[in-house]
Image: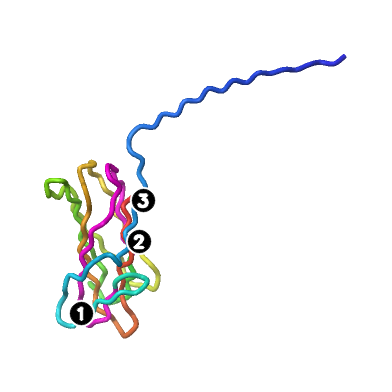
Amino acid sequence: MKQLLSATVIFVGVIVACGTVNATTRTSALVCQPAGGTVGAQLAMSNYGWYNSGTADAYIWCGLSTQAGASPRALTIRVYDRNSNGGQDVSCEVWGIDAGGGTPYHEFFTSTGSGGGAQFITNSVSIATSVNFYAASCKIPQRLSVGNYSFVTEFAVD
């Protein structure tokens, strides 16, 4: 005797998306501009980003991309800190600027010691979507020795 087994499968799916989808927006440090430094600073660019080959600290100023209407969760700055002297870390000050020119977000980012590889400095962001764009001022410390330069390479708004 043959049995016939029949089955009917009904699938009803509903996908509901609420809120804003966040995507990482990356900004290369190559779009940054020199913002001066003390006598002896020597800013230059390479495929990594901005570096300081001088004997004094140098500064860059950057406008950072962000996704319109997004509610960022974190900001990350990729740096190479190659100056092992105490207090000679790569550091950045970041502002979130709203439509009226106010700064509802303000944070300091600092590398944690020196080494050969990249460091990803991340700070959480707990602000509303009122920020239209971000701006950063970064200090790149003086070189420790010739060819041993610190870099600022990339910003990511997540």
- Which-is-in-front pick, marks 1 and 2? 1
Give the Cα distance between marks 1 and 2: 24 Å
Label 1 belongs to which residue? 41
Query: The disc labelled 3 sits on which kind of residue?
Result: Thr
Residue 20 against residue 24 in the figure, above or below: above
- Residue 70 figure quarter: top left
Q: Secondary structure at mark 2?
A: strand
Is the Cβ of the residue at disc 2 closer than 8 Å to that at disc 3?
no
Q: Secondary structure at mark 3?
A: loop
Question: Is 86 contained in the magenta span?
Answer: no
User: Could you tell whether 2 is left or right of 39 in the image?
Assistant: right
Residue 142: percent from left, percent from top: 24, 78
Residue 4: percent from left, percent from top: 78, 16
Label 3 belongs to which residue? 24
Label 2 belongs to which residue? 120
**Tag 1 or tag 3, which sits nearer the N-term?**
3
Residue 7: percent from left, percent from top: 69, 18
- Magenta segment boundaries in residue numbering: 51-78
Question: Is 65 contained in the magenta span?
Answer: yes
- Residue 5 figure quarter: top right
Residue 102 against residue 82 in the figure, above or below: above
Query: The disc labelled 1 sits on which kind of residue?
Result: Ala
**Tag 2 or tag 1, which sits nearer the N-term?**
1
Give the Cα distance between marks 3 and 1: 32 Å
Residue 32 against residue 103 in the figure, above or below: below
Categorize mark 3 by other alpha carbons within 10 Å: few (<14), some (14-19), many (20+): some
Q: Residue at x 29, y 53 (%)?
A: 75
Categorize mark 2 by other alpha carbons within 10 Å: few (<14), some (14-19), many (20+): some
The answer to which of 115 and 29 lies nearer the viewer is 29
Query: The disc labelled 2 sits on which kind of residue?
Result: Phe
